[in-house]
Image (tube, coloured by chain):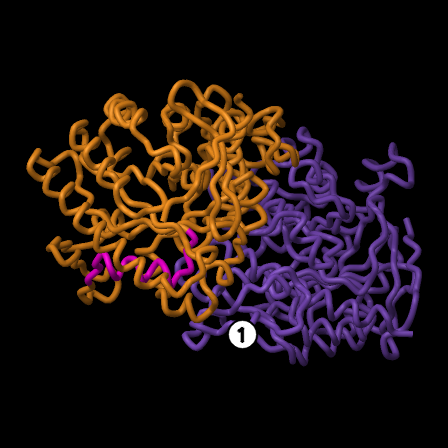
Chain colours: A purple, B orange
Amino acid sequence: MKTSFQELGKIGKYGRHGYFTTRRGRVYTPTFMPDGTRGVVKSLLPGQVASTGVQVVLANTYHLHLTPGEKVIKKLGGLHAFGGWRGPILTDSGGFQVFSLGKFTKVSEEGVTFKHPITGEKRLITPESSIQIQLDLGADMLVAFDHLIGLDKASAEDVKDAFERTHRWLERCTIEFKRLTKVMKPSERPLLFGVVQGGLDLDLRKKSLEFVQASDVGGIAIGGLSVGEGQAAMFKVLGALAPLYDPARPRFLLGVGEPTDLRFAYAHGIDMADCVLPTRNARHATVFVPGDKKMHLTNAKFISDPKPIEEGCDCFTCAGGYSRAFLRHQFKVSEPVAGSLASIHNPRYLERICEQYRVAK
Amino acid sequence: MKTSFQELGKIGKYGRHGYFTTRRGRVYTPTFMPDGTRGVVKSLLPGQVASTGVQVVLANTYHLHLTPGEKVIKKLGGLHAFGGWRGPILTDSGGFQVFSLGKFTKVSEEGVTFKHPITGEKRLITPESSIQIQLDLGADMLVAFDHLIGLDKASAEDVKDAFERTHRWLERCTIEFKRLTKVMKPSERPLLFGVVQGGLDLDLRKKSLEFVQASDVGGIAIGGLSVGEGQAAMFKVLGALAPLYDPARPRFLLGVGEPTDLRFAYAHGIDMADCVLPTRNARHATVFVPGDKKMHLTNAKFISDPKPIEEGCDCFTCAGGYSRAFLRHQFKVSEPVAGSLASIHNPRYLERICEQYRVAK
């Protein structure tokens, strides 16, 4: 199940731009994908998301599994019919949320048991059920279920253990994925991404990448970064992997949305990244401004500032003439429109970075 | 300062449809005006409001006076530049909020003193300052400052006292309005609406209408209704006034947004009405459905209902294919997009009623 990535140009020594094809059309890279946790990017309608240049929206398997449930969404025609987003949708595996949000999480070889945060009932997610859920949701790109561990309290042994389990689970994911998609025509089949783990151990990381690239997966996902290890440590891992990627497959960096991180990642072979922070920060009045800096719109100095968030920005909010003064006021009175308008600017800021890379020769 | 209402057809014996002209273009009537309390209709962008057929947005003088303040908005070019709404804006006088939200409200002949709900400082709004604030906000239609009293605890004497004060204050408003707008060309001048009071006393109501119509005002506002008196009592007042209106001026019913109330009002000479409830209810998942009924989208029976709010409805939300199941889910997880989508449907439902009246011969 190899995708065929079409390179259109280089970004530095290790980076590239180009496109790959999903069952719901081409994705031009590099690209940033906002998180539509509950089936939509919070505060935004699909047309507003599309206006930013976003091509792919991510949806969270864990949250949608809990409510309204993948069976409900499947019955309604899948996430595209449900939420109205027409471009490709990528679902994560649910692994990250199970580990970070689940209560009384227990990992066994079979999978992960956790307590439903609302009903309190026990739930088990296995590599197989993760694939089933993602297919029920109607994802165009899926992520294999991996074993994620927090780097802060992980011993070298824990990291190795998770790394090995991630590979065993990947084999189960690819088998289940093949079983469930074999009835589909090749053009209807979604892409499965395998996840590279290994913490900050460069040797494990390289072995993990080798393992994933030897598997029958359509894309490579880099997991377990941007979890508090610091920028230097993350860059070291990304730098070590950069020369080793299979050129035919797209590479997805999970959970990264800081402009400086993205610039480094795109220059080191990453094609796509997702993060909840650019839109979450926007809803809390924190927006990107030139120089990859952040501006807090609730600051009192903006009370009668007629300028847009970013002068010259072509996003709906800045080009539409919404002033800092207006946004500050609406944030101060808890008006949801403020969050929507700021949530349009931030992804646009990131997509513009991507678009600048996409013209490189 | 007489407007010239152009009648295009009748609605029953006392009603009519047609148009009048403001400095920001024509308003076709009957029409419903949503409340943009803080300078925008909550949860909606101007383009979304316009998509519903809404022509005029109301803004709340009291709220905008408190924050960010009319001087800030004036400096930024007025409410139109501030919030991006291009059609006419009507500001209320602030009177309703001073009486219903202000703490330690004290009425004197001069005006109303109240405590600022955040800073605690004493504020005084007079008929003159209400006009000044509304002009600073950049309103195309203003409402004279009136003395509103709750009907529940008002004696006949209280009602008469408020009725008389409202008339004295109207004289002060028209003088101040003339003074402040005399530098404007006639085509740049906004319209001032005088307010009819008199509680449920039909005799006082008729006298009040006579007084307002004898004043130099561009429009007639009916205040002090829909404040808990019940539909029958309100209809009695509207019925009594219906034969007495000056045909040349638009008539505005304050605070009414129930479909059955609007139908009666439009059939009895009312041209325009405003209410915060259709959009507030929408944000709380309560939407209009045919038969002037309400539907609560959070109901469990909608969990996998693929139908739109209203089948055949041409609003962005229904025509866009957003299902009850989708909206229910997004309301249950407190997703702001649910409130936006429902807030598009409700005004559209009301504007459609208006549009149906506008074709009557």
Pick the front one: B18 or A113: B18
Which amino acid, mark 1? Met
Q: Position of residue B290 (x, y in %)?
A: 50, 21
Asked if residue A105 can be seen in this view, the reply is no
Give the labeled residue for mark 1: A295
- From the viewer's perspective, tell me whether residue A166 is left or right of residue B104: right
- From the viewer's perspective, tell me whether residue A202 is left or right of residue B293: right
Q: Chain of mark 1?
A: A
Asked if residue B269 can be seen in this view, the reply is yes
How many numbered markers are drawn?
A: 1
Residue appearing at x 45%, y 49% in the figure: B42
Where are the magenta residues, as a range? B124-140
Pick the front one: B163 or A301: B163
Q: Secondary structure at mark 1?
A: strand
Decide whether residue B130 is among the magenta residues: yes
Circle 1 Cα neighbour tier, 10 Å, few/some/many (<14 / 14–19 / ≥20): some
**Location of residue B281 by image quarter:** top left
**Location of residue A294 by image quarter:** bottom right
Q: Position of residue B22 (x, y in %)?
A: 47, 48
Residue appearing at x 48%, y 74% in the figure: A305
